[in-house]
Amino acid sequence: MKSRKHAQTRPSPVPVALVLVDVLTTFQFPDGEEILQGALRIRDALVKLKARTRESGIPVLYVNDNFGDWRSEKEILMGRCLEAKGREFVRPIMPDSEDYFVLKPMHSAFYMTPLEVLLRHLQVETLILTGLTSASCLTVTAHDANMRGFDIYIPPDCSCARNAEEHQQALGQLEATAGANLTPSTSLKLPNIIRRTRISQQVRMARSTGGNS
């Protein structure tokens, strides 16, 4: 049997990825109205951060709930969101042909999804986690990422919860227990993050090949 080739998905030019969790949503769930208000407040920051990462060569990965419909395609899911009350939030941050898209069945972006395989193939080691919500899906995703050895940035202005207090509590816990860096998106120095991650990669590679012996 011939080995499969990854012709269309090549390693990323930089070892950092932007991950948007559950930003494609109808907000038709308990507390949806409260979360929508928070989402609208972070919308512009998300749009600007995505644009900056694109300029820096950082790949963008959408990991989204499948609404229980595994037969649904990305375009159908997007259409549902644009017809729902959260369209003002969703429309400016829709994925395009250069973005990656992963469906998830539960809260974590890693649980029973190909996300880790994709990140390893892209040779990514640092994640910028954003999206909905900090007290739920981002929390479990951050812990799963930490257990897998990824460095984590969670810009506070690019995620939200049901209210500001819940958001701050969730971020504080992630900083303390998952090692998350909480630098706001406007203060993120993307070239520095890329540089530090590359240095870390080189150090690990040298150790694994006995370069320090």
Image (spheres, grey):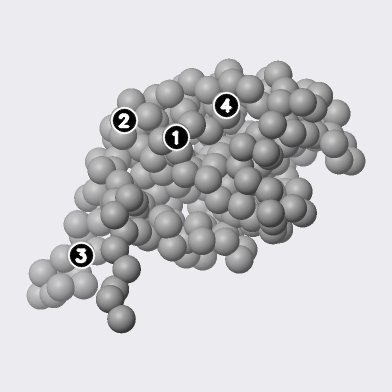
Q: Which residue is mark 1?
A: 97
Answer few, some or many: residues within 10 Å of disc 4's Cα (few below 14, many 20 plus, some between 14 and 19): some
Along the polypeptide, which appears first: circle 3 or circle 4?
Answer: 4
Which residue in the structure is indicated by mark 3? 205
Q: Nearer the viewer, mark 4 or mark 2?
A: 4
In the rendered structure, which disc, 4 or 2, sits on the residue that comes first in sequence? Answer: 2
Q: How many marks?
A: 4
Residue matched to label 4: 93
Task: Please state the horizontal and vertical placement of residue 39, each as a whole percent of the image.
Answer: 70, 27
State the residue position of label 2: 56
Q: In the rendered image, which quarter contains the N terminus?
A: bottom left
Cα distance in 3D space between marks 2 and 3: 24 Å
Q: Mark 3 is on which residue type?
A: Met
Label 4 secondary element: helix
CA gap, disc 1 and disc 4: 13 Å
Q: Nearer the viewer, mark 3 or mark 1?
A: 1
At mark 2, the secondary structure is loop
**Mark number for residue 169?**
none
Sequence-wise first label, 1 or 2: 2
Quarter of the view holding residue 159: top right
Query: Is label 1 or label 2 in front?
Result: 1
What's the amino acid at mark 2? Ser
Q: SS class of the residue under badge 3?
A: helix
Amino acid on which disc 1 is placed: Ser
Q: Is residue 175 visible?
A: no
Image position of 33 (left or right of 192): right
Left or right position of 197 against 49: left
The answer for how far apart the CA atoms under marks 4 and 2 are is 18 Å
Q: What is the three-letter code of the residue carrying label 4?
A: Ile
